[in-house]
Amino acid sequence: MKSLKTFLVENKNLHLEHLEDEIFNRGSAGANEAMNFIDSLVTMLQGNSNRKMNVTVKWDGAPSLFAGINPENGKFFVATKSLFNKTPKINYTNADIDANHGGGLADKLKIALKYLPKLGITGVLQGDMLFTSDDVKTETIDGQSMYTFTPNTITYAVPVDSKLGSQISNANMGIVFHTTYTGKTIADLMANFGADVSGLRKTNAVYFDDADYKDVSGSATFTKKETEEIRRNLAGVRRVLSQNKKLIDDVTKDKGLRDLIKIYTNANVRVGKDRGSTKELAGFISSRFDQKIEKLKTDSSKQRMTNEKNKVIRFIESISRGMDSLFSAQYYLSQAKSVILRKLQSLNTMPSFIRTDDGYRVTNPEGFVAIDHVGKAVKLVDRMEFSKANFTVSKDWTK
Protein backbone atom coordinates (compact mmCIF):
# COMPACT_ATOMS: atom_id res chain seq x y z
CA MET A 1 0.00 0.00 0.00
CA LYS A 2 1.21 3.52 -0.77
CA SER A 3 2.17 5.77 2.09
CA LEU A 4 -0.77 7.91 3.17
CA LYS A 5 0.98 11.04 1.95
CA THR A 6 1.42 9.64 -1.54
CA PHE A 7 -2.07 8.15 -1.51
CA LEU A 8 -3.73 11.42 -0.56
CA VAL A 9 -1.66 13.62 -2.87
CA GLU A 10 -2.60 11.45 -5.84
CA ASN A 11 -6.23 10.92 -4.86
CA LYS A 12 -7.00 14.11 -2.91
CA ASN A 13 -8.41 11.95 -0.10
CA LEU A 14 -11.44 11.05 -2.19
CA HIS A 15 -11.24 7.36 -1.32
CA LEU A 16 -9.87 5.02 1.32
CA GLU A 17 -9.58 1.28 0.80
CA HIS A 18 -11.21 -1.39 2.95
CA LEU A 19 -8.54 -3.17 4.97
CA GLU A 20 -9.41 -6.61 3.57
CA ASP A 21 -9.34 -5.31 -0.03
CA GLU A 22 -5.62 -4.59 0.18
CA ILE A 23 -5.06 -8.16 -1.06
CA PHE A 24 -6.99 -7.19 -4.21
CA ASN A 25 -4.83 -4.09 -4.63
CA ARG A 26 -1.38 -5.53 -4.00
CA GLY A 27 -1.65 -9.28 -3.76
CA SER A 28 0.44 -10.98 -1.08
CA ALA A 29 2.15 -7.71 -0.11
CA GLY A 30 -1.26 -6.14 0.53
CA ALA A 31 -2.36 -9.16 2.56
CA ASN A 32 0.77 -8.97 4.73
CA GLU A 33 0.24 -5.26 5.27
CA ALA A 34 -3.39 -5.85 6.26
CA MET A 35 -2.27 -8.48 8.78
CA ASN A 36 0.26 -6.02 10.20
CA PHE A 37 -2.55 -3.49 10.64
CA ILE A 38 -4.66 -6.06 12.48
CA ASP A 39 -1.78 -7.06 14.78
CA SER A 40 -1.02 -3.40 15.53
CA LEU A 41 -4.67 -2.59 16.26
CA VAL A 42 -4.98 -5.48 18.70
CA THR A 43 -1.77 -4.43 20.47
CA MET A 44 -2.88 -0.78 20.59
CA LEU A 45 -6.33 -1.57 21.98
CA GLN A 46 -4.74 -3.61 24.75
CA GLY A 47 -2.38 -0.75 25.58
CA ASN A 48 0.82 -2.66 24.85
CA SER A 49 2.09 -0.76 21.83
CA ASN A 50 5.24 1.34 21.69
CA ARG A 51 4.46 2.34 18.09
CA LYS A 52 1.88 4.98 17.25
CA MET A 53 -1.41 3.72 15.81
CA ASN A 54 -4.16 6.32 15.54
CA VAL A 55 -7.84 5.52 15.02
CA THR A 56 -10.43 7.98 13.82
CA VAL A 57 -14.19 7.54 13.67
CA LYS A 58 -15.52 7.30 10.13
CA TRP A 59 -18.60 9.49 10.56
CA ASP A 60 -21.45 8.88 8.16
CA GLY A 61 -21.71 12.55 7.22
CA ALA A 62 -22.70 14.01 3.90
CA PRO A 63 -21.99 15.85 1.79
CA SER A 64 -18.22 15.97 2.06
CA LEU A 65 -17.15 19.62 2.11
CA PHE A 66 -13.97 21.59 1.60
CA ALA A 67 -13.74 24.99 3.24
CA GLY A 68 -11.08 27.60 3.86
CA ILE A 69 -8.91 30.18 2.19
CA ASN A 70 -7.94 29.81 -1.46
CA PRO A 71 -4.13 30.23 -1.37
CA GLU A 72 -4.24 31.76 -4.86
CA ASN A 73 -6.40 34.78 -3.96
CA GLY A 74 -6.95 34.84 -0.18
CA LYS A 75 -10.72 34.41 -0.52
CA PHE A 76 -12.89 32.12 1.63
CA PHE A 77 -14.62 29.35 -0.31
CA VAL A 78 -16.63 26.18 0.08
CA ALA A 79 -16.60 23.28 -2.35
CA THR A 80 -17.41 19.62 -2.85
CA LYS A 81 -15.01 17.03 -4.26
CA SER A 82 -15.47 18.83 -7.58
CA LEU A 83 -12.83 21.21 -6.19
CA PHE A 84 -10.37 18.83 -7.85
CA ASN A 85 -12.11 18.64 -11.22
CA LYS A 86 -10.07 19.53 -14.30
CA THR A 87 -12.09 22.73 -14.17
CA PRO A 88 -12.53 23.25 -10.40
CA LYS A 89 -15.91 24.25 -9.00
CA ILE A 90 -15.06 26.79 -6.28
CA ASN A 91 -17.81 28.71 -4.52
CA TYR A 92 -17.16 32.18 -3.09
CA THR A 93 -20.76 33.41 -3.29
CA ASN A 94 -24.30 32.06 -3.41
CA ALA A 95 -24.31 32.91 -7.10
CA ASP A 96 -21.33 30.59 -7.60
CA ILE A 97 -23.20 27.82 -5.79
CA ASP A 98 -26.28 28.30 -8.00
CA ALA A 99 -24.07 28.12 -11.09
CA ASN A 100 -22.15 25.03 -9.97
CA HIS A 101 -24.72 22.98 -8.05
CA GLY A 102 -28.43 22.43 -7.54
CA GLY A 103 -31.08 20.99 -5.28
CA GLY A 104 -30.40 19.96 -1.70
CA LEU A 105 -26.64 20.07 -2.20
CA ALA A 106 -26.77 23.76 -3.14
CA ASP A 107 -28.84 24.51 -0.03
CA LYS A 108 -26.24 22.77 2.18
CA LEU A 109 -23.38 24.65 0.54
CA LYS A 110 -25.09 28.02 1.05
CA ILE A 111 -25.46 27.33 4.76
CA ALA A 112 -21.80 26.28 4.95
CA LEU A 113 -20.73 29.44 3.11
CA LYS A 114 -22.71 31.58 5.54
CA TYR A 115 -21.52 30.06 8.80
CA LEU A 116 -18.11 28.38 8.35
CA PRO A 117 -16.24 31.72 7.95
CA LYS A 118 -17.08 32.35 11.63
CA LEU A 119 -14.58 29.60 12.58
CA GLY A 120 -11.56 31.53 11.30
CA ILE A 121 -10.17 28.69 9.17
CA THR A 122 -6.75 29.80 7.92
CA GLY A 123 -5.90 26.95 5.55
CA VAL A 124 -8.16 24.41 3.83
CA LEU A 125 -10.06 21.74 5.75
CA GLN A 126 -12.19 18.83 4.57
CA GLY A 127 -15.09 17.59 6.64
CA ASP A 128 -18.39 15.74 6.50
CA MET A 129 -21.54 17.71 7.19
CA LEU A 130 -23.66 16.17 9.93
CA PHE A 131 -26.72 18.41 9.88
CA THR A 132 -28.27 21.78 9.23
CA SER A 133 -30.90 23.11 11.63
CA ASP A 134 -33.74 21.88 9.40
CA ASP A 135 -32.37 18.32 9.61
CA VAL A 136 -32.54 18.07 13.41
CA LYS A 137 -35.71 16.47 14.74
CA THR A 138 -36.89 15.69 18.25
CA GLU A 139 -37.99 12.08 18.65
CA THR A 140 -38.56 9.61 21.45
CA ILE A 141 -36.35 6.53 21.22
CA ASP A 142 -36.54 3.84 23.88
CA GLY A 143 -38.49 6.24 26.07
CA GLN A 144 -35.86 9.01 25.90
CA SER A 145 -36.25 12.37 24.17
CA MET A 146 -33.54 12.65 21.51
CA TYR A 147 -32.32 15.10 18.89
CA THR A 148 -31.87 13.04 15.72
CA PHE A 149 -30.25 13.75 12.36
CA THR A 150 -29.59 11.51 9.36
CA PRO A 151 -26.90 13.00 7.11
CA ASN A 152 -26.52 9.90 4.94
CA THR A 153 -27.45 6.35 5.97
CA ILE A 154 -27.06 6.34 9.75
CA THR A 155 -29.30 8.31 12.11
CA TYR A 156 -27.44 9.82 15.06
CA ALA A 157 -29.31 10.43 18.32
CA VAL A 158 -28.31 12.77 21.15
CA PRO A 159 -30.25 13.17 24.41
CA VAL A 160 -32.12 16.47 24.48
CA ASP A 161 -31.05 17.19 28.07
CA SER A 162 -27.32 16.65 27.44
CA LYS A 163 -24.60 19.26 26.89
CA LEU A 164 -24.08 17.97 23.35
CA GLY A 165 -27.83 18.13 22.77
CA SER A 166 -27.82 21.80 23.77
CA GLN A 167 -24.99 22.54 21.33
CA ILE A 168 -26.79 20.79 18.48
CA SER A 169 -30.14 22.48 19.13
CA ASN A 170 -28.50 25.92 19.05
CA ALA A 171 -26.37 25.31 15.94
CA ASN A 172 -27.24 26.22 12.36
CA MET A 173 -25.05 23.38 11.11
CA GLY A 174 -22.75 20.60 12.28
CA ILE A 175 -19.58 19.26 10.69
CA VAL A 176 -16.74 16.87 11.54
CA PHE A 177 -13.35 17.83 10.06
CA HIS A 178 -10.93 15.02 9.21
CA THR A 179 -8.32 16.25 6.70
CA THR A 180 -6.04 19.30 6.39
CA TYR A 181 -4.72 20.62 3.07
CA THR A 182 -1.69 22.80 2.38
CA GLY A 183 -0.26 24.21 -0.84
CA LYS A 184 0.22 27.37 -2.90
CA THR A 185 -2.48 26.55 -5.45
CA ILE A 186 -5.68 24.52 -5.45
CA ALA A 187 -4.19 22.08 -7.96
CA ASP A 188 -1.14 21.51 -5.75
CA LEU A 189 -2.95 21.04 -2.43
CA MET A 190 -1.46 18.22 -0.36
CA ALA A 191 -3.60 16.37 2.14
CA ASN A 192 -2.60 15.40 5.67
CA PHE A 193 -4.91 13.04 7.50
CA GLY A 194 -6.34 14.64 10.62
CA ALA A 195 -7.54 18.11 11.50
CA ASP A 196 -6.50 20.19 14.52
CA VAL A 197 -9.67 22.09 15.40
CA SER A 198 -8.37 23.43 18.71
CA GLY A 199 -7.49 26.79 17.12
CA LEU A 200 -10.85 27.35 15.47
CA ARG A 201 -13.12 30.02 16.91
CA LYS A 202 -16.07 28.65 18.84
CA THR A 203 -19.52 29.85 17.80
CA ASN A 204 -23.01 28.69 18.66
CA ALA A 205 -23.81 28.75 14.95
CA VAL A 206 -21.58 25.76 14.12
CA TYR A 207 -21.16 22.49 15.98
CA PHE A 208 -17.76 21.16 14.91
CA ASP A 209 -15.30 18.51 16.01
CA ASP A 210 -12.43 16.43 14.69
CA ALA A 211 -12.79 12.74 13.88
CA ASP A 212 -10.29 11.43 16.43
CA TYR A 213 -11.47 8.44 18.42
CA LYS A 214 -11.15 9.53 22.03
CA ASP A 215 -9.04 7.60 24.56
CA VAL A 216 -8.91 4.40 22.56
CA SER A 217 -5.46 3.09 23.50
CA GLY A 218 -5.50 0.52 26.27
CA SER A 219 -9.30 0.61 26.54
CA ALA A 220 -10.19 -2.88 25.32
CA THR A 221 -9.55 -6.40 26.53
CA PHE A 222 -10.03 -9.24 24.09
CA THR A 223 -11.57 -12.43 25.42
CA LYS A 224 -9.82 -15.74 24.83
CA LYS A 225 -12.45 -16.59 22.21
CA GLU A 226 -11.92 -13.27 20.38
CA THR A 227 -8.15 -13.67 20.41
CA GLU A 228 -8.43 -17.20 19.06
CA GLU A 229 -10.80 -16.02 16.32
CA ILE A 230 -8.30 -13.39 15.18
CA ARG A 231 -5.39 -15.82 15.29
CA ARG A 232 -7.36 -18.50 13.44
CA ASN A 233 -8.27 -16.17 10.60
CA LEU A 234 -4.77 -14.72 10.27
CA ALA A 235 -3.43 -18.30 10.21
CA GLY A 236 -5.88 -18.92 7.36
CA VAL A 237 -4.44 -16.01 5.41
CA ARG A 238 -0.88 -17.20 5.97
CA ARG A 239 -1.80 -20.73 4.93
CA VAL A 240 -3.35 -19.51 1.67
CA LEU A 241 -0.33 -17.31 0.94
CA SER A 242 2.13 -20.11 1.63
CA GLN A 243 0.33 -22.37 -0.83
CA ASN A 244 -0.66 -19.92 -3.58
CA LYS A 245 1.35 -16.69 -3.21
CA LYS A 246 2.52 -16.59 -6.85
CA LEU A 247 -0.95 -17.33 -8.19
CA ILE A 248 -2.47 -14.54 -6.08
CA ASP A 249 0.22 -12.07 -7.17
CA ASP A 250 -0.28 -13.01 -10.83
CA VAL A 251 -4.05 -12.48 -10.57
CA THR A 252 -3.73 -9.05 -8.92
CA LYS A 253 -1.23 -7.67 -11.44
CA ASP A 254 -4.03 -6.93 -13.92
CA LYS A 255 -5.73 -3.62 -13.01
CA GLY A 256 -8.77 -4.32 -15.16
CA LEU A 257 -9.31 -7.63 -13.39
CA ARG A 258 -8.76 -6.01 -9.98
CA ASP A 259 -11.44 -3.44 -10.77
CA LEU A 260 -13.89 -6.15 -11.86
CA ILE A 261 -13.22 -8.12 -8.67
CA LYS A 262 -14.04 -5.04 -6.57
CA ILE A 263 -17.25 -4.37 -8.51
CA TYR A 264 -18.23 -8.01 -8.02
CA THR A 265 -17.38 -7.81 -4.30
CA ASN A 266 -19.56 -4.72 -3.85
CA ALA A 267 -22.38 -6.48 -5.73
CA ASN A 268 -22.07 -9.32 -3.21
CA VAL A 269 -22.29 -6.81 -0.35
CA ARG A 270 -25.56 -5.48 -1.76
CA VAL A 271 -27.13 -8.92 -1.37
CA GLY A 272 -25.46 -9.76 1.93
CA LYS A 273 -22.80 -12.21 0.68
CA ASP A 274 -19.42 -12.01 2.40
CA ARG A 275 -17.36 -14.44 0.29
CA GLY A 276 -16.67 -14.63 -3.43
CA SER A 277 -15.85 -17.50 -5.78
CA THR A 278 -14.41 -17.91 -9.25
CA LYS A 279 -17.59 -19.54 -10.55
CA GLU A 280 -19.76 -16.66 -9.34
CA LEU A 281 -17.28 -14.06 -10.63
CA ALA A 282 -17.39 -15.65 -14.07
CA GLY A 283 -21.19 -15.56 -14.01
CA PHE A 284 -21.14 -11.92 -12.86
CA ILE A 285 -18.78 -10.89 -15.67
CA SER A 286 -20.80 -12.89 -18.22
CA SER A 287 -23.96 -11.06 -17.14
CA ARG A 288 -22.27 -7.67 -17.54
CA PHE A 289 -21.17 -8.63 -21.05
CA ASP A 290 -24.69 -9.81 -21.89
CA GLN A 291 -26.12 -6.43 -20.90
CA LYS A 292 -23.70 -4.70 -23.27
CA ILE A 293 -24.36 -7.19 -26.08
CA GLU A 294 -28.10 -6.62 -25.80
CA LYS A 295 -27.63 -2.90 -26.51
CA LEU A 296 -25.59 -3.44 -29.68
CA LYS A 297 -27.34 -2.90 -33.02
CA THR A 298 -25.62 -5.22 -35.50
CA ASP A 299 -25.06 -8.96 -35.51
CA SER A 300 -21.37 -8.49 -36.26
CA SER A 301 -20.80 -6.20 -33.26
CA LYS A 302 -22.75 -8.61 -31.06
CA GLN A 303 -20.60 -11.48 -32.25
CA ARG A 304 -17.38 -9.57 -31.59
CA MET A 305 -18.55 -8.78 -28.05
CA THR A 306 -19.61 -12.39 -27.53
CA ASN A 307 -16.18 -13.59 -28.62
CA GLU A 308 -14.59 -11.14 -26.18
CA LYS A 309 -16.87 -12.40 -23.41
CA ASN A 310 -15.93 -16.01 -24.06
CA LYS A 311 -12.24 -15.09 -24.07
CA VAL A 312 -12.51 -13.34 -20.70
CA ILE A 313 -14.53 -16.17 -19.14
CA ARG A 314 -12.00 -18.76 -20.34
CA PHE A 315 -9.23 -16.67 -18.80
CA ILE A 316 -11.07 -16.41 -15.48
CA GLU A 317 -11.64 -20.15 -15.43
CA SER A 318 -7.99 -20.82 -16.28
CA ILE A 319 -6.86 -18.98 -13.14
CA SER A 320 -9.57 -20.36 -10.88
CA ARG A 321 -7.10 -21.72 -8.30
CA GLY A 322 -5.51 -18.31 -7.83
CA MET A 323 -8.90 -16.57 -7.81
CA ASP A 324 -10.39 -18.87 -5.19
CA SER A 325 -7.27 -18.45 -3.05
CA LEU A 326 -7.63 -14.70 -3.36
CA PHE A 327 -11.25 -14.78 -2.22
CA SER A 328 -10.40 -17.11 0.68
CA ALA A 329 -7.65 -14.85 1.99
CA GLN A 330 -9.85 -11.77 1.62
CA TYR A 331 -12.59 -13.53 3.60
CA TYR A 332 -10.17 -14.45 6.41
CA LEU A 333 -8.95 -10.85 6.61
CA SER A 334 -12.54 -9.62 6.75
CA GLN A 335 -13.39 -12.00 9.60
CA ALA A 336 -10.35 -10.93 11.65
CA LYS A 337 -11.22 -7.28 11.01
CA SER A 338 -14.76 -7.89 12.25
CA VAL A 339 -13.54 -8.94 15.69
CA ILE A 340 -11.60 -5.67 16.07
CA LEU A 341 -14.47 -3.66 14.63
CA ARG A 342 -16.90 -5.08 17.19
CA LYS A 343 -14.47 -4.10 19.95
CA LEU A 344 -14.16 -0.54 18.66
CA GLN A 345 -17.92 -0.28 18.28
CA SER A 346 -18.42 -1.37 21.89
CA LEU A 347 -16.47 1.72 22.99
CA ASN A 348 -18.61 4.14 20.97
CA THR A 349 -20.60 6.74 22.91
CA MET A 350 -23.06 8.40 20.48
CA PRO A 351 -26.08 6.15 19.76
CA SER A 352 -26.70 5.48 16.07
CA PHE A 353 -29.57 3.86 14.21
CA ILE A 354 -30.81 2.95 10.75
CA ARG A 355 -34.31 4.13 9.93
CA THR A 356 -36.76 1.35 8.99
CA ASP A 357 -40.44 1.22 8.06
CA ASP A 358 -41.20 0.30 11.67
CA GLY A 359 -39.07 2.95 13.35
CA TYR A 360 -35.35 2.62 14.15
CA ARG A 361 -32.95 -0.29 14.28
CA VAL A 362 -29.85 0.06 16.45
CA THR A 363 -26.68 0.06 14.37
CA ASN A 364 -23.00 0.83 14.78
CA PRO A 365 -20.96 3.79 13.48
CA GLU A 366 -20.10 3.76 9.78
CA GLY A 367 -16.65 2.55 10.70
CA PHE A 368 -13.16 3.65 11.59
CA VAL A 369 -9.94 4.67 9.89
CA ALA A 370 -6.67 3.23 11.17
CA ILE A 371 -3.44 5.15 10.54
CA ASP A 372 -0.13 3.49 11.40
CA HIS A 373 3.15 5.03 12.58
CA VAL A 374 4.36 5.81 9.05
CA GLY A 375 1.08 7.35 7.92
CA LYS A 376 -0.57 4.49 6.04
CA ALA A 377 -4.33 4.31 6.39
CA VAL A 378 -7.16 1.88 5.73
CA LYS A 379 -10.84 1.91 6.64
CA LEU A 380 -12.58 -0.63 8.84
CA VAL A 381 -16.26 -0.87 7.92
CA ASP A 382 -18.85 -3.57 8.59
CA ARG A 383 -19.78 -4.05 4.95
CA MET A 384 -22.66 -6.40 5.71
CA GLU A 385 -24.17 -3.73 8.00
CA PHE A 386 -23.26 -0.28 6.76
CA SER A 387 -22.15 -0.72 3.15
CA LYS A 388 -25.25 -2.74 2.22
CA ALA A 389 -27.51 -0.01 3.63
CA ASN A 390 -25.42 2.73 2.02
CA PHE A 391 -25.76 1.19 -1.43
CA THR A 392 -29.56 1.30 -1.26
CA VAL A 393 -30.45 4.46 0.67
CA SER A 394 -31.51 7.63 -1.19
CA LYS A 395 -29.72 10.91 -0.53
CA ASP A 396 -31.62 14.13 -1.10
CA TRP A 397 -28.43 16.25 -1.01
CA THR A 398 -26.82 14.67 -4.10
CA LYS A 399 -28.68 16.62 -6.75
Image (cartoon, grey):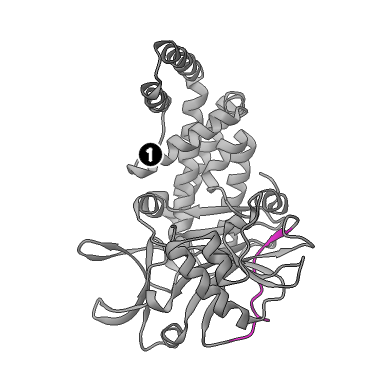
Q: Position of residue 47 (x, y in %)?
A: 59, 66
Q: Nearer the viewer, residue 95 or 30?
A: 95
Residue drawn at the location 59% of the way across and 53% of the way down: 14
Question: In which image quadrant can residue 275 be found?
Answer: top left
Residue type at tag 1: Asn
Is residue 13 visible in the rendered image? The answer is yes
Figure check: 58 above or below 229: below
Question: In the image, is residue 247 part of the stretch drawn in magenta?
Answer: no
Q: Position of residue 373 (x, y in %)?
A: 70, 58
Where, quadrant-wise, is the N terminus in this rendering?
Answer: top right
Q: Position of residue 50 (x, y in %)?
A: 69, 63
The region drawn magenta spans 189-202
Figure check: 305 above or below 257: above
Residue drawn at the location 57% of the way across and 38% of the way down: 23
Q: Residue furthest right?
A: 184
Residue drawn at the location 28% of the way across and 82% of the way down: 144
Q: Nearer the viewer, residue 313 or 183?
A: 183
Figure check: 327 above or below 205: above
Residue drawn at the location 64% of the way across and 68% of the way down: 125
Q: Nearer the viewer, residue 186 or 384?
A: 186
